[in-house]
Image (tube, rainbow, N blue to C red):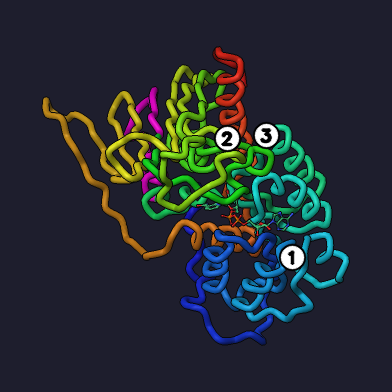
Amino acid sequence: MATIATTNLWGGPAKADADAKPKLRVALIGCGGISGVHIDGWKRLNPAAKIVACADPIEARRHQRGDELGLAKEVRFPYLKDLLKSGVEFDAVDICANNAAHCPVTVEALNARKHVMVEKPMACTPAEVRKMIAARNRAKNNILMCAQSARFQNNSLHLAEYLKKGVLGEVYYCRAQFLRRRYLPTRIGFIDRRISGGGPCIDVGVHMLDLALLLMGLPEPVTVSAITPQKLAKRNDIRGWWGEWDRKKITVEDFAVGFVRFKNGSALTLECSWLANIKEQETQKITLMGTEAGAEWPELTIHGERAGSTTDTHLKYPDDQLGGHQREIAFYADAIMNNKPSPVPAEQSLNVIRILDGLYRSHAAGKEVRV
Ligand SMILES: NC(=O)c1ccc[n+]([C@@H]2O[C@H](COP(=O)([O-])OP(=O)(O)OC[C@H]3O[C@@H](n4cnc5c(N)ncnc54)[C@H](O)[C@@H]3O)[C@@H](O)[C@H]2O)c1
């Protein structure tokens, strides 16, 4: 992980300077739920960086976000292709469209020599991620980054930095969990596999897997064994705390557990669910076991032994009150404006998607698969 983005990028809270000329001009592609959080991140960078156009095929959504951003009606478009045709000048895109659009929109943007940050999951399949990497390689000097927001939380950055000193020794096992009791995202873009690419695995498991791999030191995955069943999601007697979803249209799993083997002999298990009969409403947890010590995220505790006693240490760090999304946007802008490498190299995201794809393939095949 790169050092924390330079604070001079931060303009503090949004300022009323609609006329200031930004150094970095960004187009927001996809104006649904998560784009509102991204807008907050971009407003904090104003005037160094600014959203200058937006696109969404749903008219009401692009106008809602356009209004929030104070954008003229002429710079609100259905699709990126319309924006590119319009001649409106911009340098980078922030892609908040549904998962199935991640690959085609990224390739289109890179072909037009724009920098790309794309929401997680990077794409639905490894083949799509490889297409995106090929487009980045053709574009040469453009950033391609997946918005893995959990990496950019303060606690994640702090633990990643701390672990670089090798305090855990050899990390031979990691358990990653993102389990929800009754929180199933009800929108069609999450429950129809053709649009989402998968269920909780690709929606929330992707956060824990990406962070777990980073904390393990980015080992190379070799095989995956998993089940990714749909157990509760079609049942009418099961209630979701985010409301109702279309039982007929849900084609994704509601639970997944996978066992991943790495080239260096280490292993990881990943558990994720939207609907599980568990005590907690939601659990996000990573446990690392090493030969010298273990670590727990998000608590940031280190568990070892010294002079005949087991020890438990609680890491403390300065808290700037920024969320993962706000900081990932600052890292993206910083990388573009200061010619730094991608804060989330696409090759790391490819490994994440190779593993998630492996979970689905292993379930279908009923056996361990190579990734
Ligand atoms: N990091 C996180 O914590 C987090 C949280 C929620 C969602 N997400 C991700 O953000 C993305 C969007 O999620 P959401 O909750 O905002 O979904 P959403 O369904 O609310 O919004 C998606 C929007 O994208 C638009 N869209 C679809 N194809 C498009 C295209 N080709 N060009 C432009 N717009 C297009 C849709 O019309 C819709 O308005 C997903 O990839 C999701 O996984 C990330």
Q: Which mark is residue 252?
A: 2
Q: Which mark is residue 91?
A: 1
Q: Is 106 placed above or below 214 here?
A: below
Alpha-carbon span between mark 3 and mark 2: 15 Å
Q: Position of residue 176 (x, y in %)?
A: 40, 33
Q: Which mark is residue 125?
A: 3
Direction from residue 153 to residue 125 in the image, left or right: right
- Disc 1 on helix, strand or loop? loop
Magenta span includes 133? no
Query: In the image, which residues are magenta?
Result: 158-176
Q: Is residue 276 or residue 350 the one in the foreground?
A: 276
Residue at image position (47%, 35%) is 235
Quadrant position of the C terminus in the picture: top right
Q: Is residue 242 or residue 206 the one in the foreground?
A: 242
Direction from residue 38 to residue 91 in the image, left or right: right
Q: Which mark is residue 287?
A: none
Q: Is 312 placed above or below 65 here?
A: above
Residue at image position (65%, 84%) is 20
Q: Position of residue 45 (x, y in %)?
A: 55, 72
Q: Is residue 176 visible?
A: yes
Alpha-carbon span between mark 2 and mark 1: 36 Å
Going by the numbered disc 2, the residue's amino acid type is Val
Going by the numbered disc 3, the residue's amino acid type is Thr
- Disc 2 on helix, strand or loop? loop
